[in-house]
Amino acid sequence: MGLQLLEDQAESARALLAPEVLSYYDAGAGDEVTRVESEPAWAGFRLRPRVLRDVETVSTATTAAGVALAHPVGVAPMAFHALADRDGEVATAQGAGRSGALLVLSTRSSRSLEDVAAAASGPWWFQVYVMKDRRLTESLVRRAAAAGAGALVLTGDTPYVGLKRRVSGTRLAVPDDHFLVNLAAHAVPGQSITAQRAAAEQDPAVDLSTIRWLAEVSGLPVLVKGVLRGDDAVACLEAGASGVVVSNHGGRQLDRALPSALALAEVAGAVAGRGAVLVDGGLRSGTDVLVALALGADAVLLGRPVLWALASGGADGVAACVGAVRSHLEHVMALAGACRLDQLGPDLVVAPRAPG
Ligand SMILES: Cc1cc2nc3c(=O)[nH]c(=O)nc-3n(C[C@H](O)[C@H](O)[C@H](O)COP(=O)(O)O)c2cc1C
């Protein structure tokens, strides 16, 4: 399912990556029910195209959280890109820039955020895990703001890292210099590496008040990632969020969580234009993106396809991956009778019928 180029890149990555890296990237949590359901959930929707609408010129231009974008296909935050490519997130940023994609950089990047910022030629946002040592988080988001991040994306679905059967423990045993690349500079003199890593783990006591705190210390808009319910989206907005990312973390956190495709309409309806709505999880083609935009997303993020693209083709691979999804989006927009994104609305889609 999905675009041929993305499937080819995934196949090459499978042949190139070390088995433990492949398992870490690919794995879902628990029985992997959510990971497996994420892609087909988009294909469950049916389209109601319009005819004779002059679609000779199609534009994918949009804005998300006040940022002007050439198209709505961005890169999701993912840890440790240097396991896929020597240049890691620096190469990802180059590829994203070449293809006009918004990049969301992970707290757990394996290249420093300043190096990535220097390589970025387009908009980038910084994903935040609030760590047990709040001082670390504060320093990091101040650095992200100083380096040019346009927004913070606070991940809300990871009080603890989800257990994955295909990975021993919760995450691959990455070297300390990968895990701490953004953090070592803030270590207390004499602090052991073990203590540094412990301080950098997620703080499970994070709550909604963190949204305003992050906005204050960084001066940046804050979006909350991992929202799957309309009432939660409203709670985040009321607590100061500028938007939400509908996501189940690629099925890597709470197994049996709803596929993003089935949560999006409720969340977009609850947000009702009062903030940005992005979505990720299982998007693999322009048609998937078309459905997401029709259901109310302002933009989408691609996860694993970017890692496969990076592993198989470096920065060029990432640019090709995003470019393929974008041009497929243009194609299916035209076939659906839409030449601008503001012409995509819920009337374009028919939701899958609930079982029983
Ligand atoms: C290897 C890997 C690492 C990830 N690391 C992070 C992370 O550091 N922060 C975060 O918010 N989400 C992380 N995610 C989740 C992604 O941002 C995104 O929600 C998910 O991958 C989208 O689904 P897809 O892979 O089906 O496109 C990670 C996902 C993968 C596959």
Image (cartoon, rainbow, N blue to C red):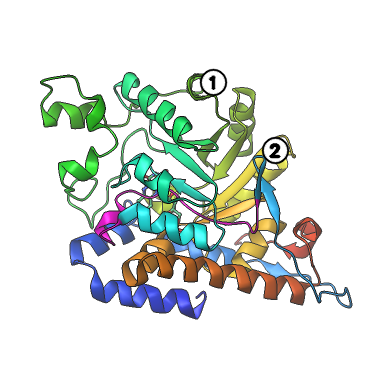
Q: Label 2 belongs to which residue?
A: 270
User: What is the x, y in percent for residue 70?
Assistant: 65, 58
Tell me the distance, in whole angstroms, between the alpha carbons under discs 2 and 1. 20 Å
Q: Residues within 10 Å of mark 1 (few under 14, many from 20)?
A: some
Range drawn in magenta:
69-87
Q: Is residue 269 magenta?
A: no
User: What is the x, y in percent for residue 83?
Assistant: 25, 57
What residue is shown at x 16% (from left), y 48% (from top)?
173
Q: Label 1 belongs to which residue?
A: 212
Apparent side of residue 256 relative to residue 16 in the rendered image (left or right) = right
The three-letter amino acid code for the residue at tag 2 is Ala
Residue 253's quadrant in the figure? top left
Q: Is residue 80 magenta?
A: yes
Q: Which residue is more in the foreground, 100 or 159?
A: 100
Marks counted in the figure total 2
Q: Is residue 81 above or below residue 233?
A: below
Apparent side of residue 347 relative to residue 289 in the rendered image (left or right) = right
User: What is the x, y in percent for residue 209?
Assistant: 50, 19
The answer to whether residue 352 is visible is no
Apparent side of residue 138 relative to residue 83 in the rendered image (left or right) = right
Q: Main secondary structure of the magenta part?
A: loop
Q: Is residue 242 above or below residue 111?
A: above
